[in-house]
Image: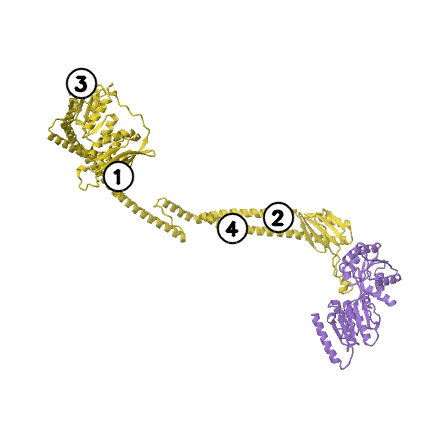
Chain colours: A purple, B yellow
Amino acid sequence: MKRSGARLLRAVAMLLCCMAGPLMASPSVYLVLSGDADAYMRTASTIAYTLQANLPGVPTIRADVDGFDAHTPAPDDLVITIGTRAAQEISRRATGARLICTLLTEQSYNDLPATEQSQRTAVFIDQPAARQLALIRTALPDWSRVAIVHGNNSSDFIRAINAAAPAMALKVRTAEVTDDQTLYSALQSVLATPSVLLAVPDPKVFNNFTIQNVLLTAYRHRAPVIGFSPAYVRAGAIMAVYSTPEQIGQQAAELAALALSGKPFPDAGYPSQFSVSINPHVARSLSIDLPDAATLEARIRRQEQRQ
Amino acid sequence: MMQSWGIRARVILVAVVPAIVLAVFMTAYYTHSRITDLEEAYRDRGRAFARQIAAATEYAVFSSNREDLRRLLDSARAEEGVRGIFISDTSGRELARSGVITSELPLRSVGRSYDEGVNQTLRFYEPILPTRLDVDLLAFDDVQQGSTTQQLGTVILDLSRTRLDEQRDTLMWTGLSALMLVLAGSVLLAIRMSQGVSQPIRNVAEAVGRIGAGRLLERVEVRGGGSLKRLAVGVNDMAERLQGAHEDMARRIAEATAELRARKEEAERADVAKSRFLAAASHDLRQPMHALGLFIAELSEKEHPPATHRLVRQIAASAEAMENLLDSLLDISRLDAGALQPNIQPTPVQPILDRIANDFHIWAEERHLRLRVRRCHHWIATDPLLFERILSNLVSNAIRYTDHGSILIACRPDGDALRIEVRDNGRGIEADAQELIFQEFVQLDNPERARSKGLGLGLAIVRRLTQLLDHRLSLRSAPGRGSVFGVSARRVAPETPPTLPPTDRQPGSLQDVQIAILDDDPLALESLNSLLCSWGCQVTSAAMPSALIDALAGRPAPDILITDYRLQEHVTGLDVITSLRHAFGYQLRAILISGDTASDPLDRARTAGIPLLHKPVRPAKLRALVQRMLASDTADTTD
């Protein structure tokens, strides 16, 4: 149903484009989705809506990455990929149009084939290390240690954390999961002293099959886990800071508007807007008093604005 | 084999076989499916249990918590049938173990649920997988989801089959028992059913058997319908017709039997009448012939002018011919009456041959024939008197039917028998007449029935006598080539020939022999008296015993008593002999004379040891007998 709706929308957009083309040769915005997951749809809808509101003359054409012809966009058109796969596919095909990547991690973005800085930018899905540490600091003022278990691809993130931690008066202890060291033993080693376990968006360490055991292990050590999505919080993390698809879509639409107005792309960056989610049951189980999510959000935002 | 089965066996077979087949099939099918189900359920349980252990031990394996694992396994091992549980990590290293893990199966490393069995153990492998918690993590993105499961370890569970085997055995025994019950039940039912089916047919069969045994009044009770009814009705009809036919036949047989009996009785009556007639006739003829013979004998003793002498000789010849004819008739009637009891004893043949030669050579010479007798030293088992009669008949027959040439009497050993042959080179006999000549009154060359050629009874008598003596009579003959009559008798070892007792009397002389005669027929008495007197005997005669005793008074005791068998007032000669012997006080020699051909007098005379002569008595025969008695007087004078 959704797909047929999208198709209808696309056909209408094409029709509009054809009709408007001879009158005013304004560029188009192509929204290329990695799939039809809810998050992608929500992001695409937000971008389309925002663009429509700000630039009524610019057509937004939504396409699936598998059905998208790389030669369709003109050089002055704009392509916005939603999701990692769409970003990888479009980068590989190297259309001439400029590219805004959304809904992918910084690490995934860095792994994309190299291209000109002016032709590509991104809004990451992951949160900046400082914001995560700020959440810990704000929500758990009594905890001064942060434990991190990571894989070999997360070195950038670890570096960022290590760089930001002293400013927050937090001590970071990390352990890498390797062939010699299992996830459990890595967890054991970092949780030996009471710490807050900060989950890393590294699928090799944290994925659907490991979450339960990680949460259980942490719980046994009475260590609160900071997740990176609301679902993580529902599964048993004490809280998480994250950006919703709408927040990311909003930011991407703003970037697109800037680009369409002739401004160059800024550097790829973290989402500027974010949300906080907490799990009061887990907090109660761990005997931790937490302020509510809105309070935390406001405090972090204030803190970021202060800097 | 089945062809020889009865109805009942067939019915039982028909009823039992489907039941048995069905029962066996159903029992086998259900038992098998139950066993399969049982086994499947057992395996399912094992798999489920292994899965349960895998789920329960997930975190313990994740955290490599061996104590935790062992505790979990120990509690799991309390489950029934569990032999042992073994938990290894992904590299196959042992994490925990509880109970006994059989070494019969190698430990595999598998990435999926798997089970295998050996002997009494079922082994289940279950990978320990981390629980998937569907969290869209940060990524909203497949790449971030970690789609590959990382196996944490493997549960190996050994279950004992003992319980399963027990259940299977129970199931099989139950199935077998049920099968047996069904079999027994169906056999019983079939037997009962078969009675209903086969009983009517068996009733029919039994009724048919009884009808076959002759009880034709048997009927089958008509029951049921269709073929059964037709069968019963058919059998009844058949029995009815059989009974009718049987009665009809019985009636005809009875009629035929009655008729036959009537004919037979008639024939017997006729035969008896004939015999009686012959007996009566011969008896009545005998008396005058007897007297006539004796008178002629006496007459010929006297001096006559030559013409008269010739007349006397002719009278004598005629009388003798008549006597011969009468003798033949008498012999036949005696043989037919069964009056002759042969006295078979070892007998030398030669004396008989001598007598025959003696008797016949004059007649043969008269007919210009040569009669030759070959000597024979053999002895045979026969009645000498009857055998002599056979031979004399054959010889007289040969002389009568041979015109010229010779007649030879010869003996030939024939196995353990001796065949005495009478050969002639006479006219011979046609092959188709050879049987005919042995019948009564048959004379081949005497259509005019000239009496001088006899009555035609000679060979008939020969045949009767050979049958009586159990001798074999044979005949070889061809027309113009003469005939050979043979009589075969059993040969016996020779005995010492009796030596003739010495006698003081001149042989052949009866001078002054004292003879008493007794006969109620005056003519016979007179003729016998005259004959004996002409032989020189001293005769005392009487018609009554008392008169004889009176007449003998004062005279010397008689040497011989000759008495008629049948006297007046129902007194027999035997009675007289007994009383006279008593009166004279010594064993008086006696001769009985009888005109009867009945066997009774002969038997009684033989029993008493007294010789009996049939009337008409030949003078020569009487004289010979008297001489023989006088010659053997040694024993008789005692007492």
Question: What's the residue at 25%, 33% (across, down)?
Answer: B372
Q: Which mark is residue B483?
A: 1
Q: Which mark is residue B19?
A: 4
For disc 3, the neighbor class at 10 Å (few under 14, some 14 to 19, many from 20) is: few
Q: Amino acid at mark 1?
A: Ser
Q: Which mark is residue B168?
A: 2
Q: Which mark is residue A174?
A: none
Q: Earlier in the sequence, mark 4 or mark 2?
A: 4
Label 2–label 1 contact, CB within 8 A? no
Q: Earlier in the sequence, mark 4 or mark 1?
A: 4
Q: Is residue B545 in sight in this rendering?
A: yes
* Mark 2 chain: B
Report whether B165 appears left or right of B94. Answer: left
Label 4–label 3 contact, CB within 8 A? no
Q: CA distance from mark 4 to mark 1?
A: 91 Å
Marks 2 and 3 share the same chain: yes
Q: Position of residue B470 (x, y in %)?
A: 29, 34
Q: Amino acid at mark 3?
A: Pro
Q: Which residue is mark 3?
A: B556
Query: Viewer-nearest of labels 1 and 3?
Result: 1
For disc 4, the neighbor class at 10 Å (few under 14, some 14 to 19, many from 20) is: some
